[in-house]
Amino acid sequence: MDTHGSITPLSRAPETFPPQREPHSAEKTIYLEAELTRLLYSQSQTTFLATLVNASILAVVLQAVLPATKLLAWFIMIIAITGARFALVRRHQRLAPTETQEGYWRTLYLLGTASNGVAWGSLCLFVFPSDLSHQVFIAFVFGGMGAGAATVLSSVPFAPLTFLVPTLAPLAIQFFLQGGSLGTEMGAMILIFFGSIVLIMRHIHTTVVETLELRFTQLGLLDRLATQTTDLEKTNARLQIEVTTRTQTEQALQESLARFDLAMQGTGEGIWEVRFAPDSKGRVLQEVYYSPLFLQLLGYQEHELPQTFGQDWLTWVHPEDLERVRTAMINHLVQHVPYAEALRMRGKDGNYRWFSARGQAQWDKEGRPIRMAGSLRDISRRKRLEDSLQTSEARYRELFENANDGIATFTRDGVLTSINRGLEHMLGRSREEMLGRHHGEFVTAASSALASERTRRAIVGDNLPSLFELELLHKQGIVVPVEARARLMRDQNGAVTGVQIVARDITDRKRAEAELRKAHEELEQRVQERTAELHLANQQLAAEVVERQQAEETIKKNEERFRALVESSTDVVMILDTDYTIRYRSPTSSGRGIHGYTVDTLVGRNALELVHPDDRQKLREVFFTEVLARPGVTQLPTFRALHSDGSWRIMEGTNNNLLDHPVIAGIVYTGRDITQRKEAEVALQESEARYRTLIESTYDLIQSVSPDGRFLFVNAAWLNTLGYTQEELSHLHLFDVIHPDFHDHCQHILSTVIAGESLRNIQAAFVAKDGTAVPVEGNVTGRYVDGKLVATQGFFRNITERLQVEKEKQALQAQLAQAQKLQSLGTLAGGIAHDFNNLLTPIIGFSELLKRTVAPGTVARNNLEEVLKASHRAKKLVQQMLAFSRPGPQTRVPVVLNEVVKECTMLLRAGLPSMIEIRSSLDPTSGLVLADPNQLHQIIMNLGINALQAMEGQEGILEISVQRVDVADAFAALHPPLTLGSYEKLVVRDNGEGIPPELQARIFDPFFTTKPIGKGSGLGLSVVHGIVTNHGGAICVDSKPDKGTAFEIYLPHLEGIVKPATEENRTFARGRGRILIVDDEQAVLLLMQQVLEELGYEAIPCIGSQEALALFLQTSHRFDALVTDQMMPNLKGTELAQAVRSLHPELPIIICSGSDLVLPEDLTQGRENTIYVKKPFTTEKLGQALQDVFQQGKKGQP
Amino acid sequence: MTRILVIDDETPVRAVIRQTLEEAGYEVNEAADGEEGLAALQTTPADLIITDIFMPIKEGIETIRTVRKQFLHVKLLAISGGGTRGMTEVLSAAQQFGAHHALVKPFTPDELLAAVAAALAA
């Protein structure tokens, strides 16, 4: 960096400094002038004050002697002028004008002063008082004003005069005009005064100027001092800036270097540098530098570079390039020829690659190279590209040269630039003869002009035919006709550089054309001759034509007739060839046929094209197998034909094979558009399907029956309901399926329908195949043709379910009525019972009292006894009645219904004839009811006994079941007092004779009985009803004659697990021991076993008495007691007991019997350990009996 | 001597009770309904009152309540032939309102005497 260059701004610095203040310079003058003016302005305030004060005094003094208006006008003028001057001064102050502007401001100021002077002077001119004293006063005031002005305005030379002259001159003139000695003297005095003031004024001015000059000089010195200080500061600042700049420059340089490095890397060029330093022997390589990229280009890392490389890098150069590179290098170093070579160098992998090398050396003054630096760029890719381009170029050149066509290029001006061998051959000239010359020399004049014209037009962008003909001139003068093709050649910018033309020799073609033309001309000649001949023949024919015309007329008429026929037909008629080509198509009046085509567009086309692709095959088949096979008409299958509007029309038609017909000789196709008909058919089918679906999916029975009773149609619901199949239907007659009860009705319906009326809401019944009657309700209508009935159509609804529901409803209503009746009866019974009890009280009471007074054995006593007996029966009856209305003492406790049922079953079973079986089915989920266990007992026993009686004398099954059920609303509504909820359902069912329907409504009525007198009170079921109702339950009966009866009792289910009261309250006589139980009925055995095990015993069941005896005979078995049934085949209970007793005399024995039994003496004698227990018995009773026999047995033991 | 007032609207019932009690040595007074019975009690004190429950004027339960309030020392035996409300329930209700014992109609003389004894002992 050039140090001087960097501080050049310093050398320019003085130019910007302010000029030094030199005495007598122009600056000084300006300065002085300006300062003087500023003095003027600065002192003006005093002047204004003096003016206003003096003017006021003067006005006051003169008002006595001068007219007031004039004086006032003068005074106002003075004030106005003073005001204006004041404004000027204020403005000057505000604007602070520069020195050069002060001159202008001075003028303004002096104008103000002059105006003021004129104003003052005007007083003397216009209103000068006549009285001397006032005149003197004026003179005095004016003098004062003048002196003041001289003092204040003297800074500017002659400035006071602007005031003094206009002020004092009128005064002096007045005095001189007055004349007289005093006037003249006064005038003279004024002049003297004026003169002296001028002198003072000059003196003051000089003083002021000198003062200002001194100040000016001082200011100059100060200026210079300040300037030099500023200079130094600025120099400092510049030096600092320079230091910063240099630092920045260095950084920039470094960045630039880095950038250069990056750039070099970016360019992909490797850098190298060599410094040459001479030594005693000549030049040696002092120092070599290779950039990292340089090494990378050769495939090396920096440290990998072979040592030898730096010393003699030329060994790395490809041998073929070595000499050239070496020469180039030397040429550069010695002769300064630029060094830029492409060379191959060997890389680390041993392969040579192409590089572009450039270099530049530096030489010393003597011209010796001191260093050389250069770059290396990998140009392998470019080389490859060049190679391929060269190959390509060579290929094209080859083509160019060997083309048969003549090819040439020429400039825009027509100068030939290249020519191929083909063209050389065509023109018989070598290219050397032609290159550089105008193409016009080698073509005919016309062709040359054409070529030039085309070139011109092509350049301006005219569209020209690509092919044109030219005539070349062969060296031997022969004209060679060619067909040419020209193309403009353009440079990269699109500018036209020349024209390429390809010419093909068409000599042979031209010759052929000429021959053709000649032949044509000969033909023409012959035609003319022939025409003449024909003309003659024509005339002969014309005559013939006239004759023919008449015949034609006839034919034409016929033809028209047929045409009219065909045209008016909606059918289409075509004549087809055997390959489907339409040879003829019938015209129509509209000009277009049913396919919408005109005749012209169809004739000649293949008829199959108009046929839908899917239908072609079937038509083709018919065509080949039938139509072509024999003459005559063949019906075609329907097919779809394309209408000109794009729609498909369904066609039906015939093909008539008239191939043998002399005139037609084809297939005549007659077709008819049946699209509408087909569409109607489809619509009909859809509609039919729709109705069929409706009919088949309905649940109603639909039938169509002929008047003679045959079924024409029935729907699926009909078949399903009546159980017939479609096949069976054909053998059925209407009356086969009509219930016999309705045959007459049906006959009546039929006659009504025949008469033409429909019937609605008919009720009838069908009979299904299985004999079930199917009640129906529906309508019947007739279908008539020509007023005659052809079918009756019936639409029926199966109302079986509806009738069932109605029936059930009726039954339920009856049940409800029954329940209500019983309720009222209960109320009645309650009332009756009360009265009865009141009646019975004295009867019994008095009878008892009377009895005491009558001796026993007398008739009276016996009579009384009878009265009492009857009274007590009456008392019992009343108690039962009350149980029906309001059952008596109740102790409602949670009861396990299943347990009560078990007990009752056991009791019932005890007195059971062997023909009757008892089955109980107890729902294990069944739980508790809140009830009086005794009353529950009573219910089950009452119903059970009734059931047994109903099955008396026959085989039967008594079923008792308990089930937990949920009662629904609807059911509850019909069975008061049930409500929605959980209930225990107790069912007692027999398969006895059943209750006749007419009696069912009365069975719960008190005193109603069907039993023989003495066998039933008629209160059993009433009591059951009362108990159930009183427990918040309900009872229903379901009975069918000969099938049996079932009583269903619903008792409210009690939630919770409460230990049944029966368990708590009853203390069974429990015990221990092994007990053999014997019975001939398995069920009884099981029950007994359960009961005994409940009582704490171990029970061993044994079916049959002989088996039991066998057990006792086996000594190994030991039992603590025997419990046996009495009535058993072979060996009765007592007999078994006797046998056992002989083996085990001390064994306690219990014999059970349903009938009264007297034990044989040998069993009871001396022993009380054998007892008889009457059936039925309870667990309690059996337990007690066992306890008794065990105790007796112990007592009896020694 | 123990005095017993019998209240019942049925004359034969009153008669058989009177005879039974008198034979057993009790002094018996009668009334046909509750109102009459209470009136009689004002003039003729009683140790025990036997009262029916269902009566036309001032029925038994009310009579029992009144007696229990006004005559604290008098024992009460309720008797009833039952009716639509149920005999047992009626009598247990009577006991709840202060009857010392209850007896179901019809009854034998022995049953009556046993009930009377039980009521007096209560």
Image (cartoon, rainbow, N blue to C red):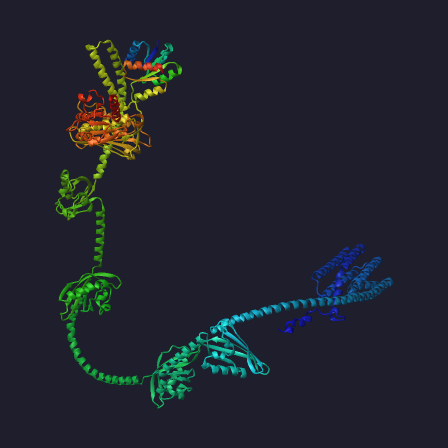
Q: Where is residue A70 in the image (x, y as percent from the top left)?
A: 76, 57
Q: Where is residue A847 in the image (x, y as percent from the top left)?
A: 24, 12
Task: Name the side, left or right, on which A568 lies relative to A28.
Answer: left
Where A580 falls versus A684 (above or below)? below
Task: Name the side, left or right, on which A449 lies relative to A775.
Answer: right
Observer-nearest of A740 and A1069: A1069
Where A187 falls versus A927 (above or below)? below
Residue found at x 31% / y 14%: B114
Residue found at x 16% / y 78%: A543
Q: Can residue A304 be seen in this view?
A: yes
Q: Where is residue B6 in the image (x, y as percent from the top left)?
A: 32, 13
Residue furthest out toward the right: A181
In the rendered picture of this protein, how many numbered marks are placed on residues? 0
Q: Where is residue A521 in the image (x, y as percent from the top left)?
A: 25, 85
Observer-nearest of A645 and A266: A266
- The image quadrant of residue A427 is bottom left
Q: In which quarter of the image is the N terminus of chain A?
A: bottom right
Observer-nearest of A1159 and A839: A1159
- The image quadrant of residue A468 is bottom left
Q: Can residue A1010 be seen in this view?
A: no
Q: Quadrant of the C terminus of chain A?
A: top left
Residue furthest out toward the bottom: A476
Where A444 falls versus A968 (above or below)? below
- The image quadrant of residue A918 is top left
Where A476 falls versus A651 (above or below)? below
